[in-house]
Image (tube, grey):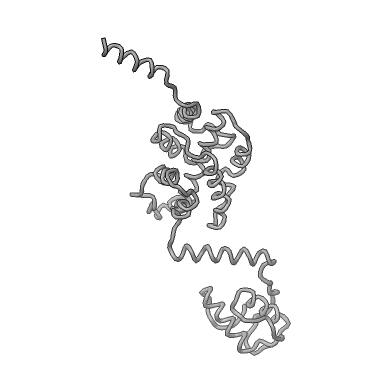
Amino acid sequence: MYALVSSLCFFLIAGSFQAPPLSEALRSRIEQLHEAPATRVLDVRLLRPDAVAHFFQERSFQPAWEGQRARAIVDAIREIEHDGLNPRDYHLAALEKALTSNAPAPAARADVEILLTDALAALIDDVRFGKVRPATLDRRWNVDPRANTPPLEAFVAQVASASSVPQVIEGLKPSHFIYRGLKAQLVARRADVARGGWPAVPAGAALKPGTSDPRVQAVRARLAASGELPSADGGAEYDDALAAAVRRFQEQHRLTPDGIIG
């Protein structure tokens, strides 16, 4: 009798248990996307639908990006421009609009969770391995940097389990000194653009050391702007100091360092 009562209680409790509405909405939406991967979410197509599906399946369709964690992902998307990528490519407009809604229904919240996960997966994939696959440019460039690496959803799960979302996303970016140098140069070149860009040198006959030409002043301004010449001060004479700066420019750009401006 005791066993019968215990069994009855167990089935009554189990029968009364229901998954939270958001988890059920996530499960339903993921199943829909599995059957029709081209289905649009918040009016946009997913970039990495397989990674999104595997991520939520492995966590039993539990939400991952509620509250400030969602905002942290959107902030990371905005800041990805510092890595040479375009924030608009990662659902930024749709996410900003969706996150302004107050207390949306479970189905709408599920869509936000899915779109956040997709944007994060695509961002991680692009920043770690490159947005352009080399083989699409030339079949001989057939080395895939993704080979023998963890699946993309594993990187997303790493972010989801972290106490600091921004810190983990930053840690997933390349740390190679060339990559860091390129980021620094990107900042510098954007600053040049904000100041109006580099001065232009008018076209004309070749300029050679020892000659005098009104365009020499434009050359001085151009080389001072990019750092090969300490100052733009000087006249129209193509003197030795300017010739040395021109040769530095030529060497840096793998041109013949003859000091002649063609």
Q: Quadrant of the C terminus?
A: bottom right
Q: Depth check: give the residue in front, 52 or 245.
A: 52
Q: Is residue 238 above or below residue 199?
A: below
Residue 68 in the image: state x and y as whole percent.
54, 44
In the rendered image, the residue lying farthest to the right is 214
Identified at 48% across, 48% down, the residue is 165
Q: Depth check: give the residue in front, 78 or 72.
A: 72
In the rendered image, the residue lying farthest to the top is 1
Residue 134 in the image: state x and y as whole percent.
44, 53
Q: Quadrant of the N terminus?
A: top left
Identified at 57% across, 85% down, the residue is 244
Residue 203 in the image: state x and y as whole percent.
69, 74
Left/right placement of residue 182 relative to residue 198 reads left
Left/right placement of residue 34 relative to residue 8 reads right
Residue 227 in the image: state x and y as whole percent.
60, 76
Q: Is residue 118 above or below residue 26?
A: below
Q: Quadrant of residue 17?
A: top left
Identified at 41% across, 46% down, the residue is 158
Mark count: 0
